Image (cartoon, coloured by chain):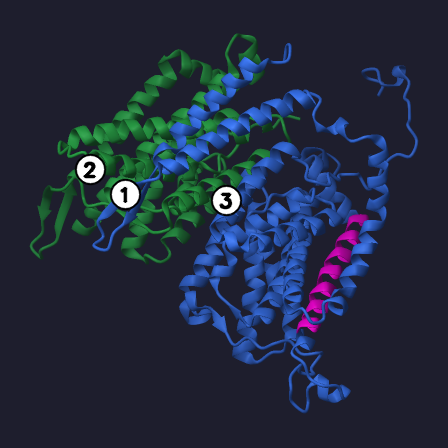
Chain colours: A green, B blue
Amino acid sequence: MDYFAQQLINGLVLGSIYGLIAIGYTMVYGIVGMINFAHGDVFMIGGFIALITFLLLISTGLTAIPVILLVVLLVSMAITALYGWTIERIAYRPLRHSFRLAPMLSAIGMSFVLTNYSQVAQGARVKPIPPVITGGYTLHESPDGFVIQLSNIQIMVVITTIVLLALFTWLVSRTRLGRDMRACEQDQTMAALLGVDVDRTISMTFVIGAALAAVAGLMYLLYYGLVDFFMGFVAGIKAFTAAVLGGIGSLPGAMLGGLAIGLIETFWSAYFSVEYKDVAAFSILIVVLIFMPTGLLGRPEVEKV
Amino acid sequence: MTAKPGIPSILKTAVVNALVALVLFSLMVGIRTEAGASGQLTYWTRFGDLAWLVAAVFGGSIVIELLRQWIGPTGAENLVPPAVKSGVSFIGRYLAPALLIFTLLVPVIFYNQRYILDLAILVLTYVMLGWGLNVVVGLAGLLDLGYVAFYAVGAYSYGLLATNFGWSFWVCLPLAGILAAFWGVLLGFPVLRLRGDYLAIVTLAFGEIIRLVIINWQDLTGGPNGVSGIPRPSFFGIPLDNSDDGLAAKLGIEFSPTHRIVFLFYLILALALLTNWATIRLRRLPIGRAWEALREDEVACRALGINTTTTKLTAFATGAMFGGFAGAFFATRQGFISPESFTFQESALVLAIVVLGGMGSQLGVALAALAMIGGFELFRSLETYRMLVFGMAMVLIMIWRPRGLIGHRAPTVYLTKAQTISSDLVKEGHG
């Protein structure tokens, strides 16, 4: 039971990170109708920028951890958002009215560019950082000595995710930009006729998605204490799985799917085998798409001729 | 687009682009991090590289803007004069036979140049993979990102059957194809309801699952260590070695290790041509026509009574079978296989060959494989930049020519005479 509870905590934390990445996939798919294959690599770039900013701040002699984290968060969000914007501008916008496989292939190319760019720029070796946020709480200690731990970093990841999700929900449902986004999702031509700047809205979608991916990258860095140039690929596929599981196009669905994937992966590693945890996640993707193509909260896609 | 932008506007664009580049590259390029000996991260600055990159972006945007002005909004299509176009089409007609004859002669011309022969075998392997994937992507229009899985199934089928049971290559080759096709059906069956992007992701997941299972199922596959000691192919039972039973001894000629390379060359050439021949023949059959119809419009297909399920399944299975053949060949050529040869990059490379070749064009795929693998060889010294350039090329080609270098989607059936229908025949209720 204790073991189960501990795994539940770990799974929820991992799921929060997946959920943050999944939002980027689901938003872009909802509006542009393409799988932004490079989004996992945007997450990786976010992690790297967070790492470098962190290193620079530490070397200036700053010791106040909250200040450092806040600056790192803002810088990595801002620069990664610019990456998202640039990627859309270069690789996707010229292809918006091309045939349907073109953006997907361009995205795959972009994913290679980003992966190898960071390998060339920062080297292939894993970059570790010492634990920044330490300490935690012991929730329960069973007689046989098993301890349920809730570390501060886990609390931080979950709280940050909740805050961002609340902010984001407010953005989509209450602001002008959110209204434009929802309008573009329904009908781009009609939205344009009614004075919505479609290009700008799509750009902003990529910017917001990339900023959320940067937060996920920072969380990953703090939680696991390392980044490497190849982490975007697997994390990206899993986050996409999460988006599909939750119902692609649905924001709460993405978060829900992220949590589900995080839990499944953690429990699978804990009770079955660590080696096959990725196989489990990918199998779920296939199974979900076969039996529930619209996901948990998605709308059925009506096909018109 | 109003009037042509002047110099100030070009400069403004360039400055903005350079500023964006400065922000993008500032931390990723300007600062280099590395884990030190004690695991402590250290960093050093590289502002010189950063300045070069930003300057390159600045100069590059000026050049692009100028080119854009010079060419104008009409695009590159009209740049080619008609005379050149007809010349190109003339060459195009004779290019395929000429290439084939040249390919047949490669082992004769380059008999003493082992490097070129090896490279040619590699190129032909990718030509075959490209042609195999072309059935799935080019003809049936199903985006398959996990094609390497079938390549792996073929390679491991032969590798394991040959090392465990001592079966010969010629027995295993059809088996490898059948097994790969079987896996193709196995994957295809559940995912048929998916379309476009979803299908792409599921096939990608499938490719990764196969690779992960190969890595982790150590009892069977040897895990990351792979399978080694895979027997070399024989000339239909006669070994190609220095022994008394060898082909050289039987023919009474002096033994040379090049014989085997030449044999491998013709083997893969034959396999590739078999793929090509089968594809061309299949295109003329109802099933091939159904594939192409499926690519153009699935809903219309269903309305016309084509069974989309079996159509997709056959496309998947056919493509997978050729992938399996290529895999068996790969295993026998290398003598060693490991999961590292079957990563997603490999799938993407084959897909890039098909797309670059202009999905559906057999000649285009062959040329694209030559360009791609040849290009990779040229940049072999720049190992780290290779995939970076590859990715950029993929993006640029998609922007420049989304339909590939040889955009070829000519329907195999068409009306020879334009038919006009009187408007009173198509009125509502009378059609």
- Residue lying furthest front in this view? B48
Q: Which quadrant would the C terminus of chain B be assigned to in this image?
A: top right
Residue B312 in percent (x, y) is at 66, 47
| Magenta part of the chain | B261-285
| In the depicted structure, whether residue A159 falls above or below residue A9 | above
3D distance between C-alphas at marks 3 and 1 = 23 Å
Q: Which residue is mark 1?
A: B43
The amino acid type found where label 1 is placed reads Tyr
Q: Residues within 10 Å of mark 1 (few under 14, many from 20)?
A: some
The amino acid type found where label 3 is placed reads Leu
Residue B100 in percent (x, y) is at 79, 58
Q: Report if residue B99 is visible in the image.
A: yes
Q: Chain of mark 1?
A: B
* Image point (51%, 52%), residue name: B382
Q: Chain of mark 3?
A: B
3D distance between C-alphas at marks 1 and 2 = 10 Å
* Left or right of B20 in this view: B98: right
* Image point (46%, 14%), residue name: A180
